[in-house]
Amino acid sequence: MSDSGCLRFESQRTDLNLLSDSDSSDDDICSLFDVRIRCHKRDWSLLHRYIFHMLYLSDRTKISVGVVCQPCTSTYLEMGFVTHPNGEMDAIERCDLLLYQHGENGILNKELCFTFVANGETYEVKVKYEYDLVHYVGNDTEAKMNERFLSCEVNGVPGRGVSEWHYNNIK
């Protein structure tokens, strides 16, 4: 069977180094671990919107949480995981970050609050976006990507991270 119509996937691991805000005189370099599935052949017109957050907390907890709207498969898909300092991982069970409530008109919030549940524990997330970068993918026209650097607080624990907001750009 020919694989010309098949999609090929690969796992990609990204380490992002961030300087943490700390009262100590030493700069603490933090490594943010993010695993993404990259598709070699992607039809960006299938995605309506998504928001992902990759958070690294001062207690060494790592969080990846996202919501996706891809109407041909699901209008609201929650995904992600929490990696605890001891290495244990918990899957995201549910998340109240609703896409239509945040930036549906293309105007992005400077701050955002949402909750999610992993392993029965509720996580309250407060995000403040500090830097934004916009670029386009899919022939530089199909999808608008907003890459956002942020500071955060999760259940009272401070952290830093990145977020990606995707918009379908076909009109």
Image: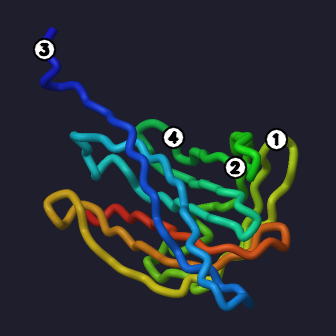
Q: Is residue 96 left or right of residue 144?
A: right
**Crowd around label 2: few <14 · some 14–19 · many ≥20 (10 Å):** many
Front residue of 69/28: it is 28
Determine the image quadrant of residue 58.
Answer: bottom right
Residue contact between numbered discs 1 and 2, judged by CB atoms under 8 Å: yes
User: Gap between marks 4 and 1, in whole Å?
Assistant: 23 Å
Residue placed under numbered mark 3 in the picture:
2
The circle drawn on residue 74 is: 4
Which quadrant of the rendered structure holds the C terminus?
bottom left
Counting residues from the start of the chain, the first of labels 2 and 3 encountered is 3
User: Gap between marks 3 and 1, in whole Å?
Assistant: 42 Å
- Of badges 2 and 3, nearer the viewer stands 2
Circle 4: element type: strand
User: Gap between marks 1 and 2, in whole Å?
Assistant: 9 Å
Residue contact between numbered discs 4 and 1, judged by CB atoms under 8 Å: no
Spot the residue most to the front. 26
Name the residue rendered at 70%, 61% in the picture.
60
Circle 3: element type: loop
Specify the amino acid type for callout 4.
Ser
Name the residue rendered at 82%, 41% in the picture.
119
- Of badges 1 and 2, nearer the viewer stands 2
Residue placed under numbered mark 2 in the picture:
82
Circle 2: element type: strand
Counting residues from the start of the chain, the first of labels 4 and 1 encountered is 4
Specify the amino acid type for callout 1.
Asn
Residue placed under numbered mark 1 in the picture:
119
Residue contact between numbered discs 3 and 1, judged by CB atoms under 8 Å: no
- Of badges 3 and 1, nearer the viewer stands 1
**Crowd around label 3: few <14 · some 14–19 · many ≥20 (10 Å):** few
Circle 1: element type: loop
Q: Position of residue 163 (x, y in %)?
A: 51, 68
Q: Position of residue 88 (x, y in %)?
A: 74, 40
